[in-house]
Amino acid sequence: MQFRTIFLLPLFLFPLLGHAQVPKELVLNKEQLAKYGQSYKTGEVIYLRKFLNTYVGHRDEVSPVDERAAKVLDSLALDKKILKGKFMVYQYSNIIGGGKGVSIVSQDHPEVILDFWVYKIEDGAYEVRDLLIQDDKRDIDSFKITYRNYLHHKTLAM
């Protein structure tokens, strides 16, 4: 009787494996794509790219207001080539404390996701207030499939 129980259990589970979640490629319509493309033209994203360029090229010239995020980058010890490379804006949203949350993913190394808090101050300038480190529980292979159209997009990159 035990033999049947052990044998039937895998037979019962086998059909369930066929219904496992298969990642679907994200396809934005024209309107959605235009709205997404606007995130790359925002002051926060443009400033974030400038911050990364300064950090990589002249670490000692990082603004004092951006120093907290720079220190977090220091602790991550990422290859400078990754930071010089192109990034996809993965998320762009309001933060309760003000400013924007800008999550970026390296196009060449999608396992690298960086979550920044970028704030517009009174004089119209920007500052990178923080780089938040979170547990990344993404399945990288599924992520690559889902965001295939945007991970290596020629014009939608920062």
Image: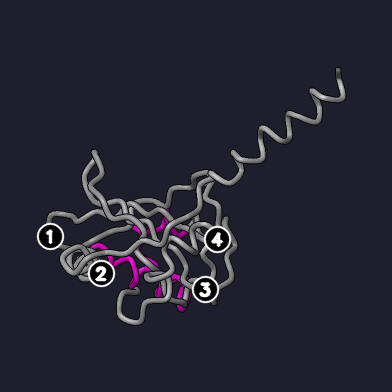
Look at the image and say whether residue 67 sits in the magenta stretch: yes
Residue nearest the observer in this picture, 113 or 11: 11
Along the viewing direction, whichever of 62 and 77 lies nearer the viewer: 77
Cα–Cα span, label 4 and label 2: 21 Å
- Under mark 2, the amino acid is Tyr
- Segment tinted magenta in the rendering: 44-70
Task: Say above or below: 130 vs 49.
Answer: above
Report the residue marked by disc 2. 40
Q: Position of residue 93 (x, y in %)?
A: 25, 50
Q: How many marks?
A: 4
Q: Is residue 3 above or below residue 152?
A: above
Of residues 155 and 129, the one drawn nearer to the viewer in this rendering: 155
Give the quadrant of residue 42.
bottom left
User: How far separated are the C-alphas under marks 4 and 3?
Assistant: 9 Å
Q: Which residue is mark 1?
A: 123
Q: Residue at the location (38% across, 67% down)?
A: 88
Residue 116 relative to residue 17: left or right? left
* Amino acid type of the residue that numbered disc 4 sits on in the rendered structure: Glu
Image disc number at residue 111: 4
- Main SS category, magenta section: helix
> For mark 3, what is the residue?
108
Tell me if mark 1 has few (under 14), some (14-19) or many (20+) residues whose alpha carbon lies within 10 angstroms of its own: few
User: In the rendered structure, which amino acid carries the disc numbered 1?
Assistant: Asp
